[in-house]
Amino acid sequence: MTTTIELPGGTWTLGDRTVSRFGYGAMQLAGPWVVGPPKDHDAAVTVLRQAVTSGITHIDTAETYGPRVVNELIREALHPYAPELFIATKAGGRRDAKGGWPAARKPDELETQIDDNLETLGVETLDLVHLRLGDANGPIPEDISEAFETLAGLQQQGLIRHLGVSNATAEQVAQAQSIAPIVSVQNMYNLANREDDTLVDRLAGEGVAYIPFFPLGGFSPLQSDALSAVAARLGASSMSVALAWLLRRSPNILLIPGTSSVAHLHENIAGTALTLSDDDLTELDQIAE
């Protein structure tokens, strides 16, 4: 792999693979509201290839993005996959006719989703599958044993290398760990949403990755006078500062910001190499308070 940009944050051992802490989330490659094909198919393929050329070795996706669309774009752009490329996906939900994200965590539903991910990505074994829990409003306290045991069984069959959970409570993380080892937790977390602070630290001590989704606030971008002030002082964008803060927050945090633009991809990579001073961190930490 030819690296043209030095990726910020270094690396992390995710399961049996060393990956770049700065990764790429592919959700935005689908059409509006993550439904249908991209507006510019060739541009989407180019972004994926440029992400890998830039040294990114961790790509996050899901069969529900499109649905199928994003996985098929990844296969078109990158297959056959480089040995160092690690592709994480999700199971536990589906898309309905209105573009909703209803849960689908019964054993037969999960088995179908794993088959669909294998087919659309063009692999015999998935690197990592996160069990998607909760709903669009966040985690929901509920028993996950049947669903996670199903994925653990598929792992034993050789269809999945590593397991994780997404949109989970701390109790559900512990329940999953009581069934089978996990290598990652993917939850909403950013400068303004710090509910998982204790969980981040616990997982770091256990060698488990924490992968924040919506690192920049999601569909409502982070807005903060403190964030804007630090960004202005550093001559950087607010998004770059927010990503750089996450890399500094804990060594087990892996970033998966998404974009459909090569220029924005390079801006994200270069911007997160910012050096944040102790004063910067103190000011940024006050945002959640």
Image: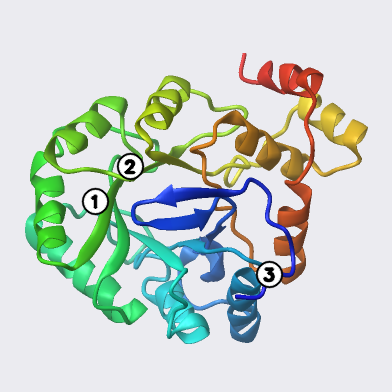
Camera-nearest label, 3 or 1: 3
Q: Secondary structure at mark 2?
A: loop
Q: Position of residue 245 (x, y in %)?
A: 67, 33
Q: Nearer the viewer, residue 30 or 24?
A: 24
**Which residue is label 3 attached to?**
3
Q: Compared with residue 256, is residue 179 higher up or lower down, i.e. above or below?
A: above
**Which residue is label 2 attached to?**
135
Q: Secondary structure at mark 3?
A: loop
Task: Residue 142: name its quadrant.
Answer: top left
Q: Position of residue 258 (x, y in %)?
A: 59, 58
Q: Which mark is residue 180?
A: none
**Which residue is label 1 attached to?**
103
Q: Secondary structure at mark 1?
A: loop
The three-letter amino acid code for the residue at tag 3 is Thr
The three-letter amino acid code for the residue at tag 2 is Asp
Q: Earlier in the sequence, mark 3 or mark 1?
A: 3
Split into 4 quadrants, where in the image is the N terminus?
bottom right
Q: Earlier in the sequence, mark 3 or mark 2?
A: 3
Q: Compared with residue 91, is residue 175 higher up or lower down, i.e. above or below?
A: above
The three-letter amino acid code for the residue at tag 1 is Ala
- Please state if 22 lies on the left or on the right of 274 as rendered: left
Residue 122 makes an appearance in the image: yes
CB contact under 8 Å: marks 1 and 2: yes
Q: Compared with residue 33, is residue 278 higher up or lower down, i.e. above or below?
A: above
Mark 3 vs mark 2, CA separation in Å? 38 Å
Q: Position of residue 271 (x, y in %)?
A: 78, 49
Mark 3 vs mark 1, CA separation in Å? 39 Å
Residue at (68%, 69%) from the top-left corner?
A: 3
CB contact under 8 Å: marks 3 and 2: no
Q: Residues within 10 Å of mark 2 (few under 14, many from 20)?
A: some
Task: Residue 217: name its quadrant.
Answer: top right
Camera-nearest label, 3 or 2: 3
